[in-house]
Amino acid sequence: MTRILIADDHPMFRAALIQALRELVPEASLIEAGSLEAVHTWLEASPDTDLLLLDLHMPGSHGLAGLASIRCRHPAVAVAMISANDDPEVIARAIEYGAQAFIPKSATPAEMAAALRAVFACEVWLPSSMQLRAPSVAVVDRDLSRRLGSLTPQQFRVLEFVALGRLNKQIADSLGIQERTVKAHLQAIFEKLGARNRTQAGVILRQLELTDPSRQVETA
């Protein structure tokens, strides 16, 4: 049975998306998640999930950093980004960091069906309007995507904690490992990312953070 995980922090949008998916793929098992932490928890328990529909700006995601963490820790799961953000640069970067599709929240049923067909066929999908405007991804993004992709899942988790300012002991306690193991992971992370220290490594990951345009309007 096809398993699709719908990750969005807006219950009403999740409900609308589920209704559309039930018509498009009635045989699929549909699961909901309201945060990136819930996504990781589900995928660790159910690594055979076929597709993740991931809201670009959901809690804990920090823009493209959430996508990068999914691709690193759960590489077998296909990811389609769902967003109201139609910035062509953001769209191009999302594809570079491993999304197989970028689906606008305003997508029609026909567009959603086309996106699902493309993803399940291991193809990249964008609405035609986005394809026409999407610019080339900067070399820095291609290089960073490659370097982050070289990290092991555990190394990426350590990097996430470093970006949050956690100390080695705190990281060790959170992951249930010893401090010397954290230090070994950090050394490998520095080498793979070309960082001199933990501050530089944290800054590298934070380059993926994005501002949510809808929340800017709410707080204006």
Image: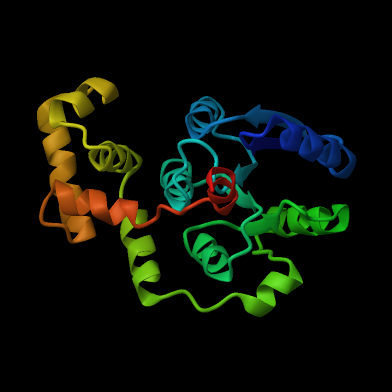
Residue 176 visible? The answer is no
Say if 110 sits above or below 26 in the image. Answer: below
Q: Quadrant of residue 110?
A: bottom right
Residue 62 percent across, percent down from the top left:
44, 45
- Identify the residue at horizontal 34%, vertical 57% (top origin): 207
- Identify the residue at horizontal 56%, vertical 56% (top origin): 99
Question: Which one is in front, 111 or 71?
Answer: 111
Question: Which one is in front, 45 or 209?
Answer: 209
In the rendered structure, the answer to whether residue 148 lies left or right of residue 105 reads left
Say if 156 sits above or below 166 in the image. Answer: below
Q: How is the image coloured?
A: rainbow
Count the numbered circles shown.
0
In the rendered structure, the answer to whether residue 114 lies left or right of residue 143 reads right
Say if 213 sits above or below 171 in the image. Answer: below
- Identify the residue at horizontal 37%, vertical 76% (top origin): 139
In the rendered structure, the answer to whether residue 113 lies left or right of residue 158 reads right
- Most distant residue in the right direction: 23
Residue 168 visible? The answer is yes
Residue 153 percent across, percent down from the top left:
35, 41
Q: Split into 4 quadrants, where in the image is the N terminus?
A: top right
Q: Quadrant of residue 131?
A: bottom right
Q: Quadrant of residue 176?
A: top left
Residue 209 percent across, percent down from the top left:
41, 52
Say if 114 sits above or below 165 in the image. Answer: below
